[in-house]
Image: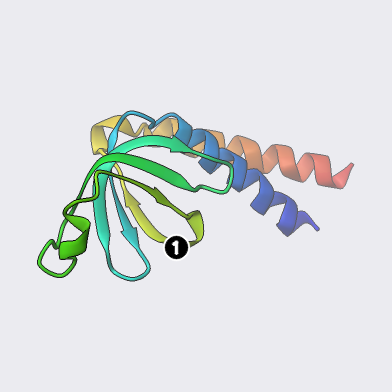
Amino acid sequence: ILKSWIVGVAEVLFYSFFKSLVGKDVVVELKNDLSICGTLHSVDQYLNMKLTDISVTDSERYPHMLSVKNCFIRGSVVRYVQLPADQVDTQLLQDASRKEVMQAKRTATT
């Protein structure tokens, strides 16, 4: 039960983190090896993302994507999300992660 609780807390933490990146440029690599660059327009609790002003990194392999300007990406097909380094406060993220895990442990043991 503790493990599933921690996973749930981590999902909320990631959701909050990605919400803070709305309006920023990201690169989303999908499990099918397609990489899409664009501006993060929105994200939901399932980490589904909507990107605007998109382009693909390998347009020769995915020519059909050249005419697409906006897209919705299901969270379960995402392999990686590359973020702008100057937009990520790693210390704040680590502190928030530790705080959430400790709070989850305290809640689960009471």
Kind of residue indicated by mark 1: Val
Residue at the right extreme? 110
In this picture, residue 97 sits left or right of residue 67: right
Q: Is 76 located above or below residue 50 in the figure? A: below
Q: Residue at x 36, y 57 (%)?
A: 80
Q: Is 58 located above or below residue 10 in the figure? A: below
In this picture, residue 19 sits left or right of residue 106: left
Identify the colour scheme used. Answer: rainbow
Q: Is 9 located above or below residue 78 in the figure? A: above
Residue 4 in the image, given as x and y percentages of width and height: 73, 57
Residue 69 in the image, given as x and y percentages of width and height: 24, 44
Q: Residue at x 74, y 51 (%)?
A: 5
Q: Which residue is drawn at 85% across and 46% down?
A: 109
Residue 49 in the image, given as x and y percentages of width and height: 43, 45
Which one is in front, 35 or 96? Answer: 35
Residue at the left extreme? 60
Which image quarter: residue 44?
A: top right
Residue at image mark 1: 77
- Quadrant (top left/top right/bottom left/bottom right) for the C terminus: top right
In this picture, residue 76 sits left or right of residue 103: left
Q: Is mark 1 on a helix, strand or loop?
A: helix
Q: Mark 1 Cα within 10 Å, few/some/many (few <14, many 20+)?
A: few
Q: Which residue is drawn at 35% across and 62% down?
A: 30
Please state the total of marks drawn on the protein image.
1
Q: Is 84 located above or below residue 56 in the figure? A: above
Residue 84 in the image, given as x and y percentages of width and height: 25, 38
- Quadrant (top left/top right/bottom left/bottom right) for the N terminus: bottom right
